[in-house]
Image (cartoon, grey):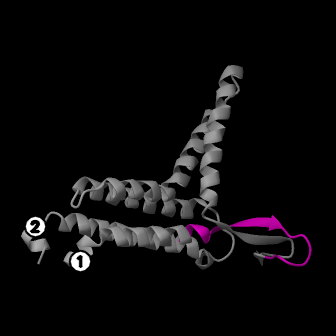
Amino acid sequence: MATFHHNKLYWRITVLILCGLALVGPWWFDSTARLGGDCLPGFPLDRDWCASPRSGLWLVFGAFGGFFALFQAGSGLLTAAIDLEALFQSLLMSLLFLLPLLPFPVTFVVMMLQEDDDRRGQLVQVIVWGMAIVGASLFSRFIGTVGPRWALWGLWLYISLALAMLLLESLALWRSRQPVSYMDE
């Protein structure tokens, strides 16, 4: 068990790489009008519509698009034509889109700044991976997906990896509470 504790850097890097691969996979399907006979790269929904998979990397564009709407709201303050409800909804959706992306920079910073047994860094990791699970789960509930939900392997892989990482970081945090002589055995 001591090797598990001493190899935190390696399993953190491995899970981050796998989460990056999960972000490349499909997270939702976008329905488009069927133009012609084929629905490539997607699949046909009916004779008029197709569904094509969208990568989790679109979360970045969605988040920054929502923040861009906040900047546009500044001009609405001058003309008194601002919709606060839409502005608030845009802000919440942008924050929701950023939650699954949060572990990447935070884990990198924790790995660079962390000493051997820094409990604060491990606690930050537990919180961040928990927030990533909540964000990805809420994202899966908010998107009204067309097509089979099992085909969203990128989303399910990400949630599974985030849950595994939450459990590993919780175990590492718990192990750091043990006496030092017990950990080295």
Q: Amino acid at mark 2?
A: Val
- SS class, disc 1: helix
**Viewer-proximal residue among 105 and 125:** 105
User: Which quarter of the image is occupied by the N terminus?
Assistant: bottom left
Taking the magenta stretch, the answer to whether it contains residue 182 is no
x, y (%) of residue 47?
Answer: 86, 76
As drawn, is 23 to the left or to the right of 159? right
What residue is rendered at 25% in x and 57% in y? 115
x and y, in percent, of residue 116 in the image: 23, 61
Most extreme residue toward the right, as rendered? Answer: 36
State whether residue 86 appears in this view.
no
Q: Position of residue 120 (x, y in %)?
A: 25, 53
Q: Which residue is mark 2?
A: 180
Q: Which residue is mark 1?
A: 3
CA distance for labels 2 and 1: 14 Å
What residue do we see at 79% from left, 72% from top? Answer: 50
Label 1 amino acid?
Answer: Thr
Residue at x 36% of width, y 72% of height:
10
User: The magenta stretch spans which residues?
Assistant: 22-40
- Dot placed on the residue nearer the N-terminal end, 2 or 1: 1
Q: Quadrant of residue 51?
A: bottom right
Sort mark 1 into few (<14), some (14-19) or many (20+) by Cα contacts within 10 Å: few
Task: Please give left or right for residue 33 compared with residue 83 in the image.
Answer: right
Instruction: Using the rendered image of the protein, determine whether residue 73 is visible from the camera's viewpoint.
Output: yes
Q: Nearer the viewer, residue 65 or 29?
A: 65
Disc number placed over residue 110 in the picture, else none: none
